[in-house]
Image: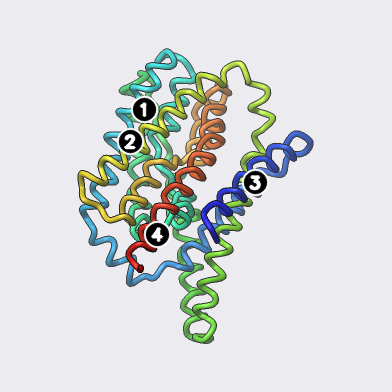
């Protein structure tokens, strides 16, 4: 599918989800189902041999981790301080949102933009573990609000949102390859299409569930939007600068752009509901972050895929 058609379908999902959400909202569990479906189809397309080879790419993995947990938190504190007081609930929400790299849908957009899914999959467990361990440090350093994250939440995410869909997808992949090898290539192609469908449905679900919350808190939205949009612009150019300075391949540059752009809002929303139950503005920041994030990811996916396509065309000709 052409990049502009994918982008148009995702934009249509934003509009449709928002309009439907004005009249009726689906259960939030549907978002979980779409995330799990997306991960299953993504993991189905991952070759274990290639994945283990990508773990050896220490230069990329180290660069991505330093970007996600040193450079980006620095940007997050500077931006949050510029837009709001560091004693406000919005400040805490911005920090929670910005410092936590995504552990699920960034893989889908990595695939759509022409990046290396196996490479970014190797990054996933490190992203998850470090954000859980470092979030209390970031909050204490920036806001003097200290709290701890229960490790049962970490294990729940790791097992149910990473290991389980990965193991099931790999088992199905192995069975199809063994029992119906002539259908295997077709199943891989079908899985790629279903990955995109799952992403479209995920976007629809998130906008459908949160449009009313946006309308109710419209008075604080400008500062939130400005801070988060500035964050995405800066991290996009940061990824490009680091990629060029590190002499990354085009696939590595796309992969780094996606892992630094996508944030782990669903997990952080759950964390904020547990530890800040009486601070709806913190929760709203995370919702706004997701709503700004998807148009941003759609835009850079179109931009990056178009450039990757042009580069591949020029090489082949």
Q: Which residue is mark 1?
A: 76
Residue at horizontal 64 percent and vertical 39 percent from the top? 207
Inspect this view and state whether residue 4 appears. yes
Answer left or right for 209 relative to 195.
right
How far is mark 3 from mark 1, CA to CA?
A: 29 Å
Instruction: Looking at the image, tell me whether mark 4 or mark 3 is earlier in sequence order.
Output: 3
How far is mark 4 from mark 3, CA to CA?
A: 24 Å
Give the image location of residue 243, x and y in percent.
26, 46
Instruction: Looking at the image, tell me whether mark 1 or mark 2 is earlier in sequence order.
Output: 1
Q: Which residue is mark 3?
A: 13
Instruction: Looking at the image, tell me whether mark 2 or mark 3 is earlier in sequence order.
Output: 3
Answer left or right for 143 relative to 169.
left
Give the image location of residue 218, x and y in percent.
63, 20
How far is mark 4 from mark 2, CA to CA?
A: 25 Å
Inspect this view and state whether residue 156 appears. no
Give the image location of residue 289, x and y in percent.
51, 33
Q: Are marks 4 and 3 in contact (CB under 8 Å)?
A: no
Q: How is the image coloured?
A: rainbow
For the N terminus, give its image quadrant: bottom right
Give the image location of residue 121, x and y in percent.
38, 57
Secondary-structure class at tag 3: helix
Q: Which residue is mark 4?
A: 117
Neighbor class of circle 3 (other Cα within 10 Å; few <14, some 14-19, many 20+) is many
Mark carried by residue 65? none
Mark carried by residue 134? 2
């Amino acid at each position: 599918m052409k990049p502009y058609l994918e982008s148009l379908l995702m934009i249509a999902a934003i509009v449709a989800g928002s309009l439907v959400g004005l009249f009726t909202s689906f259960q939030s569990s549907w978002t979980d189902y779409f995330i799990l479906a997306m991960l299953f189809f993504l993991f189905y397309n991952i070759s274990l041999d290639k994945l283990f080879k990508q773990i050896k790419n220490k230069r990329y993995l180290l660069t991505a981790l330093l970007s996600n947990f040193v450079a980006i938190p620095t940007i997050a504190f500077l931006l949050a301080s510029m837009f709001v007081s560091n004693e406000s609930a919005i400040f805490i929400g911005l920090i929670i949102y910005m410092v936590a790299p995504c552990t699920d849908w960034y893989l889908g957009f990595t695939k759509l933009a022409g990046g290396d899914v196996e490479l970014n999959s190797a990054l996933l467990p490190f992203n998850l573990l470090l954000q859980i361990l470092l979030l209390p440090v970031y909050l204490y350093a920036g806001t003097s609000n200290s709290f701890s994250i229960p490790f049962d939440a970490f294990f729940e995410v790791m097992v149910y949102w990473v290991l389980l869909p990965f193991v099931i997808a790999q088992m199905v992949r192995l069975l199809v390859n063994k029992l119906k090898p002539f259908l295997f290539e077709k199943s891989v192609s079908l899985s790629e299409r279903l990955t995109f469908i799952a992403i479209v449905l995920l976007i629809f679900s998130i906008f459908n569930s949160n449009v009313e919350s946006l309308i109710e808190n419209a008075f604080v939205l400008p500062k939130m939007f400005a801070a988060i949009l500035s964050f995405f612009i800066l991290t996009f150019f940061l990824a490009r600068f680091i990629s060029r300075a590190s002499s990354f391949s085009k696939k590595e540059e796309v992969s780094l752009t996606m892992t630094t752009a996508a944030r782990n809002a669903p997990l952080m929303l759950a964390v904020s509901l547990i530890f800040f139950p009486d601070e709806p503005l913190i929760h709203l920041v995370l919702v706004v972050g997701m709503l700004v994030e998807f148009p941003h990811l759609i835009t850079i996916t179109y931009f990056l895929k178009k450039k990757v396509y042009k580069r591949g065309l020029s090489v082949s000709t």
